[in-house]
Image (cartoon, rainbow, N blue to C red):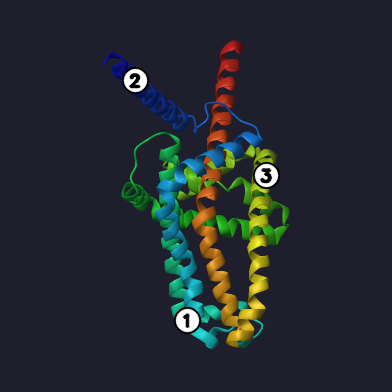
Amino acid sequence: MICAAEALDEGATSRSTETNTREIRVMAIQPTQPQGVGGVLDTAFHLYKSSFSAVWPISLLMALVNVLPLGYLIVAGPSLDPASLGSNPFAIYQNPMTLIVALTCFVLGTWVLSALLLKQRAIGADQELSIGGAFQAALPRLLAVVIATILMGLAILVGLIALIVPGVILMVSLFLYMVVLLFDDKGAFDALAGSHKLIWGNWWRTCAVLSVLAILMFVVLFALGFVGALVLPFAGFALKDAYTIGMIIQAVTNFALYVFLGPFGSAALIALYWDLKLRKEGGDLAARVNALSAA
């Protein structure tokens, strides 16, 4: 009996230790000090792995919303075939229904992405937030996020048209606008300004992190594109409609990317935000200490 009791105690202790280790590991996702580029990427991978089982319904919904416009183009048929639209690629939006579908999916996709960011941030900070709670928390911020997204696109477009370089600079410095808006409870303009302020002192470092992420995404896209290029000729020959088959392959590829890589992209944004926030707070603290010392 004593041996059995000791065995039960050891088992309970072991389970308690495993539980505590798991809790510590979850809490450790959000770093407490600035990291190097590799550390930021490692945090992003850690958050992605730890959160995917909880956020996959959101990423599935995000995939459906973002693939819906392409699905509509497939269903619309030859009337929207690019070959029949002439030299103007925007002529496709002359169809009112196409424009309505695109705008609706843009707004819904923005809402879903906001919920995904809030849910993953909660997981990384070891906080309780249900999927429904994430959507509910994101809804009041939806209009501000949509406005900020439009303003960011216009700012980058103007910068690229002007001298290209300003557009590239803004593309990086405004990249975290959505995270700043959601996490710091900012308005549209303040979120854009906050992202610029947060990144500006670490612009090159942020650019390095984003470049690595872009390379990783490109490798995955290239692999999927290569598979699609192999399938397309055979499918097009069998069904006598290469255009429709190409659109279907693109839709399936995009769907898979949003489901499996969407949460990684949002995790990378959160990891980068955490790191830059720590650096900004450390810099502000050092400035205050120096000011007090000088006084």
Q: Give the left or right position of residue 80, taking residue 216 as reference.
A: left
Q: Are marks 1 and 3 in contact (CB under 8 Å)?
A: no
Question: Is 35 placed above or below 91 here?
Answer: above
Q: Amino acid at mark 2?
A: Ala
Q: Amino acid at mark 1?
A: Val
Residue 184 in view here? no
State the residue position of label 1.
75
Q: Residue at x 52, y 54 (%)?
A: 260
Q: Are marks 3 and 2 in contact (CB under 8 Å)?
A: no
State the residue position of label 2.
7
Q: Which mark is residue 207?
A: 3
Q: Position of residue 62 (x, y in %)?
A: 45, 59
**Distance between mark 3 and mark 2 Cα atoms:** 55 Å
Q: Position of residue 89 (x, y in %)?
A: 62, 78
Between discs 2 and 1, the one toward the N terminus: 2
SS class, disc 1: helix
Which mark is nearer the camera, 2 or 1? 2
Q: Nearer the viewer, residue 277 or 222?
A: 222
Between discs 3 and 2, the one toward the N terminus: 2
Q: Nearer the viewer, residue 134 or 48?
A: 48
SS class, disc 2: helix
Between discs 1 and 3, the one toward the N terminus: 1
How packed mark 2 is, by other alpha carbons closer than 10 Å (few <14, some 14-19, many 20 or more), is few
Q: Position of residue 175 (x, y in %)?
A: 58, 48
**Distance between mark 2 and mark 1 Cα atoms:** 64 Å
